[in-house]
């Protein structure tokens, strides 16, 4: 890996991001335009994200399944809003086995239609409900402007699809999964998020209501980090998903869908990273602790490596890597692991062995302030304490950044200035024309109508008419 310095985040955030993804070996560009190859370091990060989410899904009663990658074109045409929303992004297969297909196949952009078709076969009675299924897979959306992890033609994700007997159950499911995403973001990724509902204009194609967790990136832009949709009976009617209720009467089910993708890796990079590279939250980092042995003579080498191996075994509960490379200097190793965002570095040299000590270097605090000299005794407990401290510190810092860059402007002119480099938390009348005016004037959009509202009324920041809800406005990825 190159040890060259990254571009400054402040001077060119986009270039900093692109080079960091490549230099830290999270991903690389594929030979197909707009696609990416997720490298082992990036895939391990994704596996840790999967693990944190999958545990939560199963705790809430969901099970995993797998559905086909190819979807008949006619399926998408059954739900009008859905096909209109996705038609510009579809990849269509018209030839298979050297012959024209009778019906074109869509490479799945999302799976509501094929899963709706299967649910119509499986669900016959109220006894079959609820159906709580999630799948881990990949989807294809033909994006014109792409960026590694954030927006690629093919990406990896999970998509949950549930069917319920009542509207209330489906709405409760929609919000439950939104809260699952928020809990994961805050407690595993140390990414502060605002849970809220999307506007009519910004909602998922085919949904009745769309909910989102919105996060502020290091350049103050917003990122939609996960979504949960209440689909009502739109797809149930399109695919005739019906059941006999308790009174032996035929009813349509109520459905939901929800998803979080590899885009969340981009959220972690842009929320926490600095000019030295990645800063990964300990709960998700592929490597939590790197041990760096330091020696010059062969005699020192044997003593140091013996101690390093003993400490490695004591830290067996953590994801630990020993950097035993001899062709590079300790300084090179420090820079290398800082670039990769390993939360904790432990340096061990001959003097440390004499003094029964080690040097801890926290990734979230660069330089001398992030270093401490500690005893080798009870090292597992000290590592546990350090990683917990780093995890909390990362969240606190990111939350402080969001608060510092979120304003409540009092005039529309002030609003325009705020959303150039931050978020505006403003009253909005929820009229389409005001939302469009904001987008035209500033390129900012309504990010979400937060679940938590002040419980009073105000005046719309755009038109000065009465408004019931405060909304976050920002430019977004």
Image (cartoon, rainbow, N blue to C red):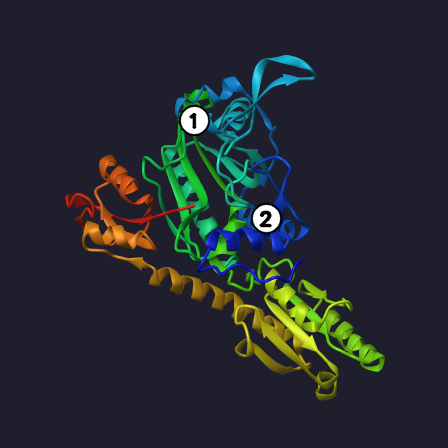
The residue singled out by tag 1 in the image is: 82
Instruction: Determine the residue positioned at 36% across, 33% down.
Output: 208
Q: Is residue 433 above or below residue 1?
A: above
Instruction: Determine the residue positioned at 27% across, 43% down.
Output: 441
Secondary element under disc 1, as helix, strand or loop, is helix
Q: How many marks?
A: 2
Q: Which residue extends farthest bottom?
A: 355
The residue singled out by tag 2 in the image is: 50
Secondary element under disc 2, as helix, strand or loop, is helix
Residue 151, horizontal then vertical, whole percent: 51, 41
Query: Which quadrant would residue 203 be assigned to in this image?
Result: top left
Q: Is residue 285 above or below residue 451?
A: below
Q: Is residue 305 left or right of residue 272?
A: right
Q: Is residue 292 left or right of residue 366?
A: right
Q: Is residue 74 above or below residue 151?
A: above
Label pair 2/1, CB-CB below 8 angstroms: no
Q: Nearer the viewer, residue 426 or 247?
A: 426
Specify the quadrant that holds the N terminus.
Answer: bottom right
Residue 374, horizontal then vertical, whole percent: 63, 82
Instruction: Determine the residue positioned at 69% across, 15% down.
Output: 98
Residue 268, horizontal then vertical, whole percent: 51, 55
Mark toward the viewer: 2 or 1: 1
Going from N to C along the chain, the mark reached first, 2 or 1, is 2
């Amino acid at each position: 890996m190159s040890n060259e310095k990254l571009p400054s985040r402040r001077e060119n955030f986009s270039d900093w991001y692109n080079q960091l993804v490549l230099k830290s070996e999270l991903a690389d560009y594929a030979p197909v335009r707009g696609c990416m190859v997720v490298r082992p370091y990036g895939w391990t990060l994704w596996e840790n994200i999967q693990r944190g989410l999958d545990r939560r899904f199963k705790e809430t009663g969901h099970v995993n399944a797998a559905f086909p990658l190819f979807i008949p074109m006619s399926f998408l045409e059954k739900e009008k809003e859905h096909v209109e929303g996705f038609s510009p992004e579809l990849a269509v297969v018209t030839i298979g086995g050297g012959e024209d297909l009778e019906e074109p196949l869509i490479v799945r952009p999302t799976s509501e239609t094929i899963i709706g078709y299967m649910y119509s076969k499986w669900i016959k009675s109220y006894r079959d409900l609820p159906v709580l299924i999630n799948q881990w897979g990949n989807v294809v959306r033909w994006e014109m402007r792409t960026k590694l992890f954030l927006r690629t033609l093919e990406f990896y994700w999970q998509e949950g699809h549930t069917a319920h007997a009542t509207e209330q159950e489906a709405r409760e499911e929609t919000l439950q999964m939104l809260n699952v995403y928020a809990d994961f973001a805050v407690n595993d990724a140390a990414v502060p998020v605002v849970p809220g509902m999307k506007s009519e204009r910004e909602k998922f194609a085919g949904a009745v209501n769309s909910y989102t967790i919105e996060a502020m990136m290091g350049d103050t832009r917003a990122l939609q980090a996960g979504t949960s949709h209440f689909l009502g009976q739109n797809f149930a009617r399109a695919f005739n998903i019906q059941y006999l209720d308790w009174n032996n009467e035929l009813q349509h089910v109520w459905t939901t869908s929800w998803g979080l993708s590899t885009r969340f890796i981009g959220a972690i990079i842009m929320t926490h990273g600095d000019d030295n590279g990645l800063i990964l939250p300990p709960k998700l980092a592929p490597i939590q602790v790197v041990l760096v042995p330091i020696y010059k003579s062969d005699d020192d080498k044997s003593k140091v490596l013996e101690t390093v191996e003993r400490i490695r075994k004591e830290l067996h509960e953590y994801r630990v890597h020993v950097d035993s490379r001899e062709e590079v200097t300790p300084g090179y190793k420090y820079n290398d692991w800082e670039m990769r965002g390993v939360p904790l570095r432990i340096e061990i040299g001959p003097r440390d062995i004499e003094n029964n000590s080690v040097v801890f270097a926290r990734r979230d605090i660069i330089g001398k302030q992030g270093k401490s000299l500690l005893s080798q005794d009870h090292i597992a407990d000290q590592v546990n304490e350090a990683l917990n401290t780093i995890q909390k510190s990362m969240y606190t810092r990111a939350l402080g950044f969001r608060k510092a860059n979120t304003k409540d402007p009092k005039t529309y002119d002030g609003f325009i200035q705020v959303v150039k480099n931050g978020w505006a938390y403003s009253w909005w009348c929820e009229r389409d024309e005001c939302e469009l005016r904001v987008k035209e004037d500033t390129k900012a959009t309504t990010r979400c109508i937060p679940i938590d509202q002040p419980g009073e009324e105000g005046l719309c920041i755009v038109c000065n008419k009465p408004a019931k809800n405060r909304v976050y406005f920002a430019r977004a990825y």
